[in-house]
Image (cartoon, rainbow, N blue to C red):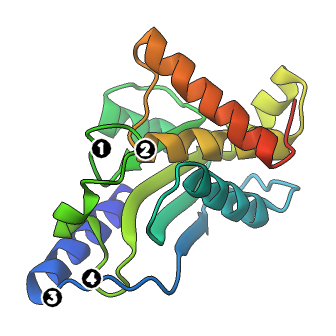
Amino acid sequence: MKRKICQRIRKIKKDLENKPFRLWRGSMTIEISYESEKKLDIPYEEIVNKMVVSALDFENCPYEAEVSVTFVDDEEIRKINSEYRGIDKSTDVLSFPFNEFEIPGNFDNIEESVDAFNPETGELLLGDIILSTDHIVEQAIEYGHSETRELAFLVVHSMLHLMGYDHMEDEDRVVMEERQRKILELEGISR
């Protein structure tokens, strides 16, 4: 998994050195990989696609984007969490943003960075989302809602991270939670 992420970033950087930048707005790539043995009994691809697009629309992203979403088990997400964050325990979702936003959700300065775009498609490279299927099932039970709602929430949460939002400070947490709630409401997803 981590090798796949690093290889992808190296390939993109190499391509950027060898090809001129061009913005092409004809498609959007949401790459979904399922590497967990635990199967979700929900239309996870449809949910992921819908929530990625909803989050981008809510934030008025002016670009077609590229996002990678990978489903793994608790053991794999624990390893990734340990390696990249130094936290040796499993978690529900990890977000690996490709870009830094000066202001969360503000795409004004993105064009200044050629590295922000895939040179082959012109799509904005937002980053990678890693989801634990074990946590999706467990948290749906714990919070008393459906696996669909849990997956939708985690995708929206992670998409906001990819667009520069965080919840380290109370005021940032409030902003992020409100955006999550509104996006889910717009899609008719409630607890």
Marks 2 and 4, the one that precedes in the sequence: 2
Please give left or right for residue 102 compared with residue 166 in the image.
left
Q: Residues within 10 Å of mark 3 (few under 14, many from 20)?
A: few
| Distance CA(mark 3)–CA(mark 4) | 7 Å
Task: Identify which residue, 98 or 79, lies in the foreground.
Answer: 98
Residue carrying label 1: 101
Screen quadrant of the N terminus: bottom left
Q: Nearer the viewer, mark 2 or mark 4?
A: 2
| x, y percent for residue 3 | 32, 62
Residue carrying label 2: 105
User: Contact (CB < 8 A) between labels 3 and 4?
Assistant: yes
Quadrant of the rendered structure where residue 43 is?
bottom right
Give, as a three-letter code, the residue at label 2.
Gly
| x, y percent for residue 52 | 61, 57
Residue carrying label 3: 20
Q: Residues within 10 Å of mark 2 (few under 14, many from 20)?
A: some
